[in-house]
Image: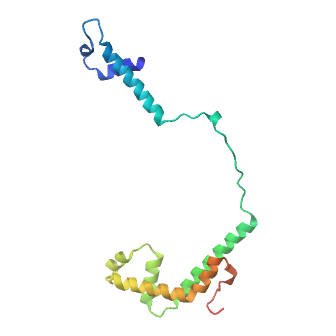
């Protein structure tokens, strides 16, 4: 009931409008105000569902730390990844044209898009795209076997040098 009085006080600027005469209050207006408060209360409860903690069954799962074997496998995978990256860098550095080396490093080692690179260097997007496509093909032919070993988890088969 207190909220009804607060709401009336807040929204009724002229108290004479809710009075029939000097002493009698408009009961219908008060009834509608209380009804609206109740409806607001129901809406609020629908939004926020109350759940008793006694009704919830809690289960705990023990999470084990990674075993030594898993840690070793993860370290081996990281080393294999480093080997692949080093093989890619060696291959790129062996290319004769500095343009190819530079374009590969700028495009693949930064977040610069082909369009941005084209705008900054005045090289056509088509030329950059075709060059990058060629780089990909070169790396695919030379490092496909090592990459497949990485995918298969045969990390020990990845060659450190191309000659191995």
Describe the colour scheme in one phrase: rainbow
Front one among 70 and 45: 45
Q: Position of residue 23 (x, y in %)?
A: 28, 5
Question: Where in the figure is residue 47, as x and y percent of width and height?
Answer: 46, 36
Q: Count of labels shown?
A: 0
Relative to residue 27, is residue 128 depicted above or below?
Answer: below
Is the residue 102 above or below the residue 3 in the image? below
Q: Residue 101: horizontal and vertical position, in percent?
A: 46, 86
Residue extending furthest top? 23
Left or right: where does residue 106 sit relative to residue 18?
right
Report the quarter where the C terminus lies.
bottom right
Q: Compare residues 76 and 51 and report the one nearer the observer.
A: 51
Please give the name of the residue rendered at 45% of the width and 83% of the height, measured from the top-left corner: 104
Q: Quadrant of residue 77?
A: bottom right
**x and y percent of residue 14 in the render?**
24, 17
Residue 80 visible, this angle: no
Against 20, residue 76 (above or below) is below
**Residue 19 visible in the displayed image:** yes
Q: Quadrant of the N terminus?
A: top left
Q: Quadrant of residue 111?
A: bottom left
Kindly give the residue lying farthest to the right in the view shown: 68
Residue at horizontal 61 percent and vertical 81 percent from the top:
148
> Which residue: 33% across, 78% down?
120
């Amino acid at each position: 009931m207190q909220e009804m009085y607060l709401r009336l006080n807040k929204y009724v600027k002229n108290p004479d409008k809710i009075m029939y005469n000097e002493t009698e209050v408009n009961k219908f207006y008060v009834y509608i105000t209380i009804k609206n408060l109740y409806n607001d209360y129901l809406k609020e409860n629908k939004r926020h569902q109350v759940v008793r903690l006694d009704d919830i069954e809690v289960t705990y799962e023990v999470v084990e730390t990674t075993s030594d074997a898993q840690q070793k496998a993860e370290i081996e995978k990281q080393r294999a990844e480093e080997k692949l990256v080093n093989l890619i860098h060696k291959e790129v550095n062996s290319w004769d044209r500095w343009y190819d080396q530079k374009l590969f490093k700028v495009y693949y080692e930064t977040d610069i898009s082909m369009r941005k690179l084209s705008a900054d260097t005045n090289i056509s997007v088509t030329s950059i795209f075709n060059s990058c496509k060629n780089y990909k093909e070169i790396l695919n032919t030379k490092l496909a076997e090592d990459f497949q070993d990485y995918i298969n988890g045969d990390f020990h088969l990845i060659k450190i040098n191309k000659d191995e």
